[in-house]
Amino acid sequence: MVAPPRIGRAARSPRVTGVTGPVPPRVDVVCLGESMVTFLPSRPGRLADVPSFDRAIGGAESNVACALAAAGHAVKWVSRVGADGFGDHLVAAVGAYGVDTSGVRRDPDRPTGVYFRTATDRATDAHEVAYYRAGSAASAMSPATVPYRDLWAGRVLHLSGITAALSADCLALMRELTRRRPGRPLVSFDVNHRPGLWRDGSGADVLLELARGADLVFVGDDEAAQAWGLRGADAIRAALPEPRTLVVKRGSAGATVLTREGSDGARDSGDDTGSAPAQSTQDAPAPDTVTDMPALHVDVVAPVGAGDAFAAGFLSATLRGLPAAARLRHGHLMAAATLTVPGDLGTPPTRADADRLAGLDARAWGRLRLGPGWTAAIEQEVRTR
């Protein structure tokens, strides 16, 4: 059984540039990133043909925050939104999940981002997404505009590669947050490679740099192949030797977690954060413990947001000190809750139901099939094949 990363007692306040006064009470997870108002089509078809849209919210990091809060964790979302009606809606909608939104700043000069998408699977050529986020309030996030007292208030700081692509200031902030130093929270980083956001083609190198500074990294094998030309967990691990935990998502095939034991930064920081110092180039990496877990059979409604939900499920189980196999299963269960709804956010199963399903033997796990509504009436909706 793999020991989960050690992620922090509520210990002494970190000492970082930009922190003044006492650090607020610690939460489980702080999520930093842009959220946008999402317009979902009322029917399938091209954007040119869809007559009306339903309003929702979407954003990788706020998705993780909402899912974790719905699963019973204390979560803070840090971002910037416009001083407009869409900003009002975002803050209210994220807050309705129980997320602390006190770290969201309002920008009087820049708008809240919005986007429209078709109902078609984004893996097909028919899928369309129209973003209206250039010059958004969130693109003004920087080391000077985002208070560190908000960012370092949790046991875990969750980041995404999307933020780094928004502006030069956002990239500077991300580089600062992934710089290894004593006392920082455990840094969780979802690569989230979005080629369309990187107009200058620098995305692959930047994302690799940021991932190497994190403690826990989520990456899809498909995006690793697209961004870095790497295929398979071993090749990805060779390029990312520094993070203590690497999660490689393989879509409907499942996921693999590679966990490296050894130095975790506790001796350097005096805080049990699990944040590891930079690896010496002369030290051979410690061996990994590798755990594979097949995905569930799911009747997919829409795939958008499933990766964020998986990260939330994995983080939830990690916060609870569960072993590697359970962390992967909780990730799959949370992803299944999102895959079976049309929007970016699904209703997760109760903790008791998730624990029961995650505890099934391998044969029973492999026979589960989950469809729309399964989390609302789990006894009736979960069926076996």
Image (cartoon, rainbow, N blue to C red):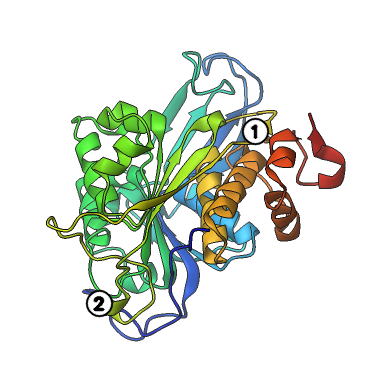
- The residue that appears at 56% across and 68% down in the rendered structure is 74
Q: Residue at x 40, y 32 (%)?
A: 221
Along the horizontal axis of the image, is 70 left or right of 208? Answer: right
Q: Residues within 10 Å of mark 2 (few under 14, many from 20)?
A: some
Q: Earlier in the sequence, mark 1 or mark 2?
A: 2
Which picture quadrant has residue 167? top left
Q: Which mark is residue 342?
A: 1
Note whether 41 is above or below 160 in the view shown: above
Location of residue 23 in the rendering, given as x and y in whole percent from the top left corner: 38, 81
Q: Secondary structure at mark 2?
A: helix
Q: Is residue 45 left or right of residue 282?
A: right
Q: CA distance from mark 1 to mark 2?
A: 46 Å
Q: Is 294 displayed left or right of 246 in the figure? A: right
- Residue found at the far right of this picture: 380
Where does residue 157 sit, x and y in percent of width and height?
Answer: 40, 62
Considering only vertical position in the picture, is 137 above or below 39? below
Residue 289 disc label = none
- Tell me if residue 85 can be seen: no
Q: Residue at x 24, y 35 (%)?
A: 204
Query: Where is mark 2, residue-wise?
Result: 268
Per the image, label 1 sits on a secondary structure element best described as: loop
* Quadrant of the image containing the C terminus: top right
Could you tell me the amino acid type at mark 2?
A: Asp
Please name whichever residue, 279 or 187, is drawn nearer the observer in this view of the structure: 279
Which mark is in front, 1 or 2? 2
Residue at (42% x, 42% y) in the render: 113
Position above or below: 259 against 382 = below
Quick check: can you spot residue 14? yes
User: Percent position (x, y) of residue 155?
Assistant: 44, 70
Residue 143 picture location, percent across and down: 23, 62
